[in-house]
């Protein structure tokens, strides 16, 4: 059980005047349980937690009870088990009615360390596969190899996008198809382990003539976003920096063509950065910006600290270049 999360939640419940509260959403279940997973079908919980009088009680069916206690949740104090055919509706108030995102997004030291391990493993898995890819691979072959590498490290790919040369210039969210990679490919991963989600993107060129120039442009846009990712800054300030950077590179229209990222954590985007969003960044938060152009994208997950940004998805084996004083993954050629 995540005791720091429980303390945050109890303080919030007291302020709201709630005597009990039910946790259903998978991201909140993972947060409160210390990394447990209440899903079987992706995104759909098969169990929920009840917080009452400072205690945490697990509710689930007889199908799941023993497995959840043995493999997903440590330190559970009470449990209510129901027949699989008579699972009641969770009570109210609950986290379908009340947003707990503000309680989750500042990560504890223990959560930060989990995130470091996840980011390192996700970057290593993705990097190894993309470095091994060949132009005649299909997008589905690359996606399958990435998924295998991630699952070997206990990471669930909650988002896995792959595009080859043909589709990378058309779509921002390219679900992998049976198309060859050709001269250029991109792989995008949002990988989940112990509830936390690491976001990263890698590109590889097999001699594509436009790839280098496009990639250098998105690195410039990302640099502006990272420069703006300071404790006390707002997401709207980050978005304004990104919009201006697109203008500087001569591609202002790209700002409208895809979202630009935001705060990361227990979802790929805990808070999406949008114009006017006054959410303030703080040390202990993670951000993942993903500026893009047709044919190029860059993305890593960074932890905000009082000393600056820490790249959680850094891959020491991936070629790097220095952009605005930071080591960033280069276009692999």
Image: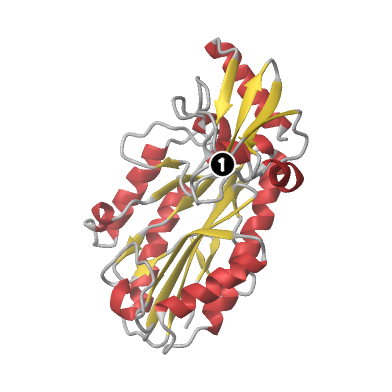
Q: Nearer the viewer, residue 308 or 52?
A: 52
Q: Nearer the viewer, residue 150 or 46?
A: 46
User: At which x and y percent is residue 17?
Assistant: 55, 10
Q: Residue furthest left?
A: 253
x, y percent for residue 237: 38, 39
Instruction: Identify the image's colour scheme: rainbow, by chain, secondary structure or one colour.
Output: secondary structure
Q: Nearer the viewer, residue 139 or 239?
A: 139
Q: Left or right: where does residue 73 sit relative to residue 25?
A: right
Above or below 185: residue 82: above
Q: Which residue is mark 1?
A: 46
Residue 38: percent from left, percent from top: 60, 43
Question: Which residue is nearer to you in this view: 174 or 238?
Answer: 174
Task: Confirm whether residue 283 shows in the render.
Answer: no
Position above or below: 186 against 135: above
Residue 221 locus on image (x, y percent): 37, 58
Badge 1 element: loop
Horizontally, residue 106 falls left or right of residue 247, namely right
């Amino acid at each position: 059980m995540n005791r720091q999360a429980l303390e945050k939640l109890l303080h919030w419940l007291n302020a709201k005047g709630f005597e009990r509260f039910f946790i259903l959403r998978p991201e909140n279940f993972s947060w409160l349980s210390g990394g447990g997973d209440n899903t079987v079908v992706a995104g759909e919980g098969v169990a929920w937690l009840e917080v009452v009088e400072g205690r945490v009680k697990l509710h689930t069916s007889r199908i799941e009870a023993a497995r959840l206690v043995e493999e997903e949740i440590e330190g559970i104090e009470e449990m209510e088990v129901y027949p699989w055919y008579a699972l009641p509706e969770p009570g109210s108030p609950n986290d379908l009615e009340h947003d707990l995102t503000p309680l989750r997004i500042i990560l504890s030291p223990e959560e930060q360390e989990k995130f470091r391990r996840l980011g390192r493993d996700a970057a290593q898995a993705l990097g190894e596969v993309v470095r091994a890819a060949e132009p005649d691979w299909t997008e589905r072959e690359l996606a399958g190899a990435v998924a295998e590498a991630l699952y070997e490290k206990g990471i669930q790919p909650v988002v896995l996008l792959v595009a080859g040369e043909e589709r990378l210039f058309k779509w921002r969210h390219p679900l992998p198809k049976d198309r060859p990679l050709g001269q250029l490919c991109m792989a995008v991963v949002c990988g989940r382990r112990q509830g936390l989600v690491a976001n990263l993107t890698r590109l590889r060129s097999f001699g594509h003539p436009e790839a280098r120039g496009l990639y250098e442009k998105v690195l410039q846009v990302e640099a502006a976003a990272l420069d703006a990712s300071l404790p006390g800054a707002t997401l709207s300030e980050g978005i304004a920096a990104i919009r201006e950077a697109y203008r500087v590179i001569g591609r202002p229209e790209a700002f409208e063509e895809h979202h630009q990222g935001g705060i990361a954590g227990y979802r790929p985007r805990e808070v999406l950065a949008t114009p006017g969003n006054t959410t303030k960044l703080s040390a202990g938060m993670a951000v993942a910006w993903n500026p893009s152009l047709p044919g190029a994208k860059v993305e890593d997950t960074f932890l905000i600290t009082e000393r600056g940004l820490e790249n959680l998805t850094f891959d020491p084996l991936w070629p790097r270049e220095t952009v605005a004083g930071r080591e960033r993954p280069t276009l692999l050629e």
